Amino acid sequence: MKNETILVVGGAGYIGSHMVKDLLETGHKVVILDDLSTGHRDLIPGGNFIEGGLGDAALLDRIFTSNRIDAVMHFAAFALVGESVEQPLKYYQNNVSATTELLSAMVRHDVKRFIFSSTAAVYGEPLEIPITENHPCNPTNPYGASKIAVERMLQDCDSAYGLRYISLRYFNASGAHESSQIGEKHQPETHLIPLILKVATNENKNVKIFGTDYPTPDGTCIRDYIHVSDLTQAHLLSLSALMEGGKSVVYNLGNSRGYSVREVIELARKMTGHRIPVVETDRRQGDPATLIASSDKIKRELGWKPQYEDLEKIIQTAWMWHQKEAK
Ligand code: UFG
């Protein structure tokens, strides 16, 4: 791996901070841009941190002028499905309009490689499982719509300006860095695994199960959980592909194996020794019953090999981090 300089936008967030750590450990120079609206300064593992927004054209010009950026990785999005339904313009403003500023700055400064954090939410209600990249994209919420809008914009930027991109459609990102130095930290927390573990550390009293009448074997939603370090490995492979002149492409990232909400809770009970009380409630708006990825394409084309296919390993890393955080 060469010593490229990477601009990581959103490097103080959950996935972005893991990316910064891996980039530094593989010998890259890293410039981090984050406005700390949802990120945390204490998650940034190193690199050159600049506090600011990705929609700030003057700041972007300064960054691209004072650093020779080889590629941009973009993690800075609002990513809560429910909030996006209530506040769609917040999502279009940050996820689409501000991203337009970032891409415009890249074009102005002739930076032609871009790795984009996309999502399974671009597909909407699945027509078939597992979901391949050829599945139609009919997002059912503004969050998914904002991500597919950027993917569309990227296609056009490729044709018009030769900007090469890899768009990675994550399924359920989870787990923490093996070192337990960084992990999943959201404020407020809405994701299943951290919420379960916050019961195990006695920060919360119980975990809610959103819906028990789904058309799944135990009535709860099935998701495909993927470890955050397997996501960052996929970014490193994508970076190499773009550096070697690879073309623009879209990949799914999941483990091709689904676990129901009840199965996740049961496994966490076994691993933490806590009885983790649950409260069964109504469905959460906009949740599809089952989301499972086919990730064959990135395995075949980039040789991606996940190291944490087993949900137990994923929860183990998250549990280590949560225990440390709770102290
Ligand atoms: N769930 C509960 N109780 C909770 C929290 C979640 O039962 O307290 C359930 C949800 O209903 C869902 C599953 O647990 O069935 C996982 O929920 P998360 O909130 O952890 O994750 P999502 O599947 O909703 O979201 C993920 C990503 C999004 C992405 C989405 C694609 O975090 O960015 O997948 O649908 F958009």
Image (tube, rainbow, N blue to C red):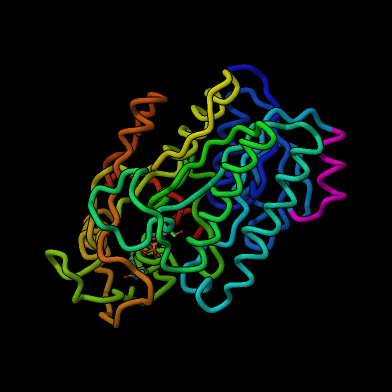
Q: Which residues are magenta?
A: 55-66
> Residue at the location (23% across, 53% down)?
128
> Residue at the location (32% across, 63% down)?
125
Vertical position of residue 317 compared to residue 125: above or below: above
Q: Position of residue 3 (x, y in %)?
A: 67, 20
In this image, 71 relative to 177: left or right?
right
Front-lying residue, 141 or 52: 141
Quadrant field for ligand 1: bottom left
Give yes or no for residue 63 being in the magenta stretch. Answer: yes
> Residue at the location (53% across, 79% down)?
86
Quarter of the figure with residue 270: bottom left
> Residue at the location (67% across, 65% down)?
93
Vertical position of residue 304 compared to residue 16: above or below: above
In this image, 279 relative to 113: left or right?
left
Residue lying at the far left in this picture: please name it. 217
In this image, 163 relative to 302: left or right?
right
Front-lying residue, 138 or 176: 138
Q: Position of residue 73 (x, y in %)?
A: 62, 40
Q: Position of residue 149 (x, y in %)?
A: 56, 55
Q: Is residue 87 visible?
A: yes
Residue lying at the far bottom in this picture: please name it. 282
The majority secondary structure of the magenta stretch comes to helix
Q: Position of residue 108 (x, y in %)?
A: 81, 38
Front-lying residue, 308 or 305: 305
